[in-house]
Image (spheres, rainbow, N blue to C red):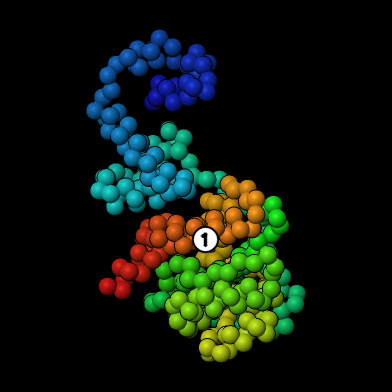
Amino acid sequence: MKYAFVECQRRQHSVRTLCRALRVSPSGYYAARSRPPSAREERQSSLTTKIREVHLASRETYGAPRVHAELSVQGIACCRNTVAKLMRRAQIVPKAIRQFRVTTDSRNTKEVLPNLVRRCFEAERPNACWLSDVTYIPTREGWLYLAAILDVYSRAIVGWAMSQTLGGQLTTDALAMAISRRGVPELVHSDRGSTYATSIYLDLIRKHGIRQSMSRKGNCWDNAPMESFFHSLKTELVMHCDYKSRDQARASLFDYMEVFYNRQRRHSTINYVAPLAFEESTSA
């Protein structure tokens, strides 16, 4: 194990320094290196190569649980702990985590509605419960605001809208897209942001007879799956990008939501299946 660590790190540090830190001899390392690999080492090397391929295909976002799920689908038998160990050894890590500020402004929300969801983020069918929220994306031209709608059943993003201004039109456009794609939901839940209490948004809600639900003030856990989506979006994509324009950001966000997240990214809540694949499997 110590010699394997030296082999992995020898491009960053001298062999002598590594051996001294691990209290092994350089001659022992070179002797071990000259020996042909054992069958176990060959299996681990082959598995590490597969792990790296899966990690790269995930846009370097997958940790051990999702990598293990993808390997299982490919028919590669291994345990999750082995995957985690080999990822640590090969320094294969998912993209970093970073904290972001909350954008909710409930000071101008005239109508505060009850929380009908009550943190029960499970649904037996599509369109039973949608969650919505707004976040902001930094670009060199200024902020780009993103409103998104998530179906609790499959965790799919069913509607979205982007704008350089934050207002009721943004959240209304996202809801209108979701309705045009999926039909009318039974319930839509959001935080108490003022964009969810504008006349244009409420008119669309009432037109379709949709029940509206709101989180309690300042409680992000009341909209946890939506918060989780934005967290993934930012840690897996946004914080690694330097958008020169809003149009560049729009194209990048579209690709993440419609191509990667909905169709490729394995979601832990639905047994590590991509959201739209989960819907297809349950509708058959």
- The answer to which of 184 and 125 lies nearer the viewer is 184
Tell whether 147 sits left or right of 71. Answer: right
Can the viewer see residue 118 in this picture?
Answer: no
Number of other residues with Cα within 10 Å of mark 1, as a class: few under 14, some 14 to 19, many 20 or more = some
| Residue farthest right in this picture | 107
- The answer to which of 176 and 128 lies nearer the viewer is 176
Rendered view: 68 above or below 155: above
Choose top left, top right, bottom left or bottom right for residue 40.
top left
Q: Quadrant of the N terminus?
A: top left
Residue at image coords 44%, 12%: 26
Tell whether 34 sits left or right of 205. Answer: left
Report x, y in % for residue 186. Answer: 48, 83
- The answer to which of 36 and 56 lies nearer the viewer is 56
The count of marks equals 1
Rendered view: 224 above or below 79: below
Tell whether 222 sits left or right of 37. Answer: right
The residue where tag 1 is placed is 254
Residue at image coords 45%, 67%: 156
Can the viewer see residue 35 in this picture?
Answer: yes
Rendered view: 127 above or below 46: below
Report x, y in % for residue 218. Answer: 67, 69
Q: Amino acid at mark 1?
A: Phe
Residue at image coords 25%, 48%: 75
Tell whether 35 sits left or right of 1. Answer: left
Choose top left, top right, bottom left or bottom right for residue 38.
top left
Report x, y in % for residue 116. Answer: 55, 81
Report x, y in % for residue 168. Answer: 66, 76
Residue at image coords 35%, 36%: 48
Q: Quadrant of the C terminus?
A: bottom left
Q: Give the structural element (helix, strand or loop) at label 1.
A: helix
